[in-house]
Structures are given as structure tokens and as C-alpha cells.
Image (cartoon, rainbow, N blue to C red):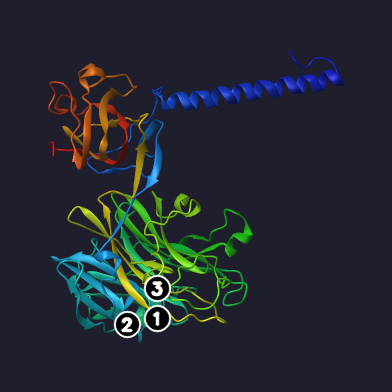
Amino acid sequence: MFCEGKGNSLRVCVMRLLVLALIFTANCVVESVCAGDGALDAASAVIDVGRRKQLLVDDAVIAAQSNLRRELGRVTKANGRQPIFTQGWFYGTVLHDEGCFKLWWRKPAGGYAYATSKDGLHFETQAELTGINFAGDYTLAVTIDPHETDSEHRYKAAYDAQGMAAGLAHSGDGIHWQPYNDGRPVTGRAADTYNQIIWDQDARTYRLFTRSDFGTAGGATEWRGTRSMVNRDIKHDPTAWQTVRSWAFDREGPQERQRRQIYALTDWIYEGIHFALMSVYEWPGDTSEGPADLHRRHERDVMNFYIATSRDGDDWDLRWVYEGCPLVPRGPDGAFDKDIILPASSIVTHNDRHWLYYAGGNERHGTEQVRYPRQHAIGLAWLRLDGFVALAADATGGTLVTKPFRLEGPAVALNIEACRGECRVEVLDEEGRPLPAYAGAAALTQCGVDGLRVSPRWEGKPDLRALVGQVIRLKIHLKDARLYSFQVLDAAP
């Protein structure tokens, strides 16, 4: 119809087709924007929500949203921003187990010790670790294996073994260790900064995270990356690791290694989300800010603590790195953590908040040619429960609509911060049509709420008991509010 003729007519034909393509693309964009205002796809697949808490770190449970933005959580540094432990530092681990906090920390002269605390702030050393033949940088990441049935293998650890490779060990008390593989490494190089083993319950496999190197290994052109591996049965063969992914920062091209490198990464799994706890080496080897200065905060050759999120533990959403938003910011001039922050291998969740332990350093990383003297200590920051990432709305308001899910309990709870704002929750059917008894005027507005488990309200309806077993969606309205998660419960909190 548009392609008759030759020469100029053909060019006109092509131009008309391009215009049509642009119109079609524009219409798709408009439809996408409208979907955020409630034009939902009635054919959306029903997702499994169950009673697991749904964190809003990504769009996995969200069908549409309007006028909302994602914001990183805000931490509070404990102990007046001063260290809580000065005898040693990390690489290491803090766990809460058997009614107390347990700390595995690196001794300044090498090797590791074990300390405990009732309040998570004041630790007492109990013993030095035995049975592990550390090498290199003396790194250790300890985990309690929920998959294990043998009490002597309850604690598992990954550490740096000979040849810049990863070693594995097990223990019944966290103090006396027995290496797997007769003490020999279970991987090749380069694995000298935070080797970590964890059990992934959803995937039914062990995961091992280590450093990986790119370029000429051990040479001047080497740069840092990280790798993840899987092994379903480490007792049968502790060396049978299959590499899933080995990667480095490269979104900005090959020169990005001069701007940032991944120094260390461990994986912490919470409510089905993998959180990468990353120490990112920024402007590596750039010593242009001058000689050692234990007071002045530096911005180059420093290490920052970022998080990334994933649904599978391998493909990470690195937005916070590229937006320059560390989870635990380095301290100001004169602070013990002004130039280096290295996270513990995992996060403790206790008493309705997250405990983020980290090592701090008051000078830069340095190079082979430039060695900076510095002091190290262990600090602590607290984070609101589930408060890693929020969907936030300003005073003009915003909405989100979930994907359809089968309601398996009579109550819903929101983790929401709206001290000066408000929220309202409507219930829709599978196709996105409002259910009159739980939508419109029947969905009550709640003002000035701030809670970890806030129950939505509906006129004349104490809960969603009448809808249990049905496929529904939630439409959540927010103003001046930050929403962190929602969860289906057996009863209203």
C-alpha cells in the first residue's frame, strides 16, 4: 500500500514505515505508563506468595506501579559511631546462635579467634581456633548449616588455603575445626579474599563464593572479579565445584577497572532474596590524594560496602553500586572507618532489626609501592527490619499493584514507614477488578503509621478471611511513605 514506485518514492515508503514504527513504539510506551496506573494484564500468571515475606527490592511481585521510586535503606551506626571491638578485625563472621552473638575475628598477627556477647556490643574472647592451616590473607567465613544432620559438621567455614585457593572445614563448636579434603584446597586460584560456603535451601545446593582474577594472574595487568560455584554434596566430594559465573565490573567498558573493582563478595539469603555483601575497591591504586593521613577522609583508593540483590545468587542487580549508594557509608574525617569498610560475611537478624557488622580502616588500601599505615577495628550499624530497599512515594502519592497470588491466610501485614504520610490497601480480583467490600471507600486510609507489621483496614471487615483460597491482587496507595515489604499471615498482628 505504501511501497509503490521507485527512487524517491521508495525513500518516502521507507520514511512512512519508520513513522508507523515510531507511532507503534510510542503507543507501547503509553500503554506501559498506563499499566502503572492500573491497566493490568488480565492474563498475568499467578505467583506463589504463600506466607513468605515479600521484599520489594525488585519487581518480581509487582505488576504495575505509578509515581514510586526505589530508595536504599538508611542505617544507624551503633556505639556513637565508635568501634565495638578493637582487638582484631575481619575478614570474619558474626552469627546469633544459642542465645548469644558469636564472633570469629582475625588476629593482627594472623589466625582467628572466637568471642561471644549477650548484647552484640560487648564481646569476650573465648578461644583461638584450631585445626585450620591458614595461608595468605587469613580470611574466614563461618556459617551454620541448616541442611546438616551431623552435629560435628554443624558449622562450616571457607578460608584461604595454600596457593591462593579456597579451603573448607567443619566444626561442632565453632572452635575446633577439621578440614575437608585432608586440608588440601578445593578450588584453584584466586581465592584469597572472602571465601564463603552457604547452603541454598531453595536451590538445594551448597554455594561457594570466592575471588576470581582477570588479566594476567598475579601480574601487573591482573584485576579483581568474583565467582560463584555449586556442589550438592560436599561430603561426597568437596572438590566437585561447578562454576556458575565468574564476573567483574564491566558495564562501563574495559576501562571501568580503573574506576572500581569487586574486592570481596559474600552471599546472605533472607526471605528468598540473595543479598551480595560487597566490598568495592574504588579508584584502585590511585594514590594521588597524597601521603598517609589518619585524620583526613579520602575518596580514592578506598573500599565501600554496597549490596546487590538477586533471585538466584548469580545474576546481581548492581544499581546501588552504579548510583554510588553504599549501604553503610564510610565515616567522616577522623573516623575509624573513614577510608575502608569491609562487611562481615553475613548479617544478623535479631530483635526485629538487622545487625550489620563491619571492619573499618582509617587509611587507604595502598599498592605494592605505597604502603599506608592504618588501624583496624570492628564496627556495627543497625537497619530497620526488611529495610534494605523501600518503594517510596512523595506527597503527591503513588500506587503499586501486585501480581495475582492465591491468598493462603486471612491477614496481610505491611512493613511501612509513613509517620507524616498515609497508606490505603484495596483488594482486586485476579483480573485487576476491585472487590467492592475491600476497595474504593471500603478501603480505609491510615495516617501517621510506622510499623513492621501494620494491618490494612477495610470498612466492616476485620481481615480477609472471606477471601482465603481465592486469587487476588493488592493495590497499595502511598503518600509520604516508604514501603519495605508485605506478608500474608495466619492472623492479624
Q: Quadrant of residue 153?
A: bottom left
Q: Is residue 395 left or right of residue 171?
A: right
Q: Is residue 102 left or right of residue 313?
A: left
In the picture, the disc for residue 184 is 1
Q: CA distance from mark 3 to mark 1?
A: 32 Å
Which residue is tagged 3? Answer: 361
Q: CA distance from mark 2 to mark 1?
A: 23 Å
Nearer to me, 211 or 116? 116
Q: Is residue 133 left or right of residue 125?
A: right
Q: Amino acid at mark 3?
A: Gly
Q: Amino acid at mark 1?
A: Arg
Q: Tell me the element at label 3.
A: strand
In the picture, the disc for residue 107 is 2
At 26% across and 71% down in the image, what residue appears? 84
Pointer 2 or 3: first along the chain: 2
Q: Is residue 10 above or below residue 125?
A: above
Q: Tell me the element at label 1.
A: loop
Residue 201 seen in the figure:
yes
User: Where is residue 47 shown, x and y percent of the image?
Assistant: 33, 35
